[in-house]
Structures are given as C-alpha cells and as structure tokens.
Image: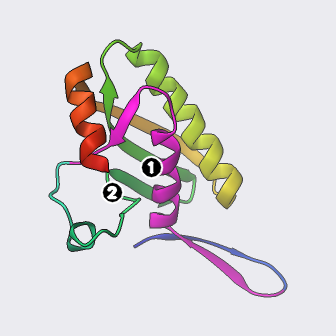
Amino acid sequence: MSESVTGNSVGKIKIADNVAAAIANITAQEVEGVIRVTDSSTSSIGEIFGKKNYSKGVKVSMEEEGTNVELALVIEHGVNIVALAQNVQNSVKDAVESMTGINVKEVNVTISDIVFEDKKQQEENKEQ
C-alpha cells in the first residue's frame, strides 16, 4: 500500500491510497448517469457480510509528480458518455485534492458497461 506523507512541526500525516480511492469511488457515484463503480473481481468477504469496500473498482498510484486515479464505471443508457466521463474526472480530481491535499495528476475513466432502464431497476434493487 502506498501513501502520501506530509509533515509539520507536530509530526507526520499519512494518507493511505485506499482513502483517496474511497473518496474517488463515492464522488464518482454522485455524478448523474453513473450507476456504480465496478471492477472485474468478485465480491470480498466483507461485502458478503454487509461491509462496503469504497475503494473497490478504483486504482490509485501515488508518485512524486502526482497521483493517478483509475476508475471503471457502469453508466445509464442515454447519457453523453464523454461529458459524463469528463464530469467524473473533474469531480474526482477536485474532491481528492480538496479533502487530502494530494496533487492529482490524472483521472482515467473506463466505461465498462451501460445499463438500460430495465437493468437499472435490477441494479438499484441489488444495491438495497
């Protein structure tokens, strides 16, 4: 696990990459047209027992010149994909930077699936 470390006169502040990933995940899901952040792995044991993994589906690489964030999204049918992806990029960059002070160099978005209206209902029911 990588982390961002900053120091001050009182001591060090460490921010783990999964914190930035969780911020990115939650922020992306707040963008209209995003159904969910996804990845190809199966559910973890924690998710089976009701614990949400908010960093799932997000890859964060912290480097000296800046942090790279990668997200895979399932989106609604009918939205402008490019506009939605750009909205996610800007929202995630702003949220991670404002909440952590970490410089975000890139936010890369992959649209991995598109959900039609009847599937959207199934997705929403599955989340409950």
Residue 81 figure quarter:
top left
The residue that mark 2 highlights is 56
In front of the other: 54 or 122:
122
In front of the other: 96 or 6:
96
Nearer the N terminus, badge 2 or badge 1?
Answer: 1
Residue stretch in magenta: 10-39
Number of marks in the rendered image: 2
**Vertical relation: 41 (above or below) 89:** below
Relative horizontal placement of residue 110, taking residue 65 as reference (left or right): left
The residue that mark 1 highlights is 25
Label 2–label 1 contact, CB within 8 A: yes
**Vertical relation: 88 (above or below) 60:** above
Tell me the element at label 1: helix
> Could you tell me which residue is drawn at 47 percent across and 40 percent down?
28
Relative horizontal placement of residue 56, taking residue 45 as reference (left or right): right
**Quarter of the figure that contains the N terminus:** bottom left
User: Is residue 27 magenta-colored?
Assistant: yes
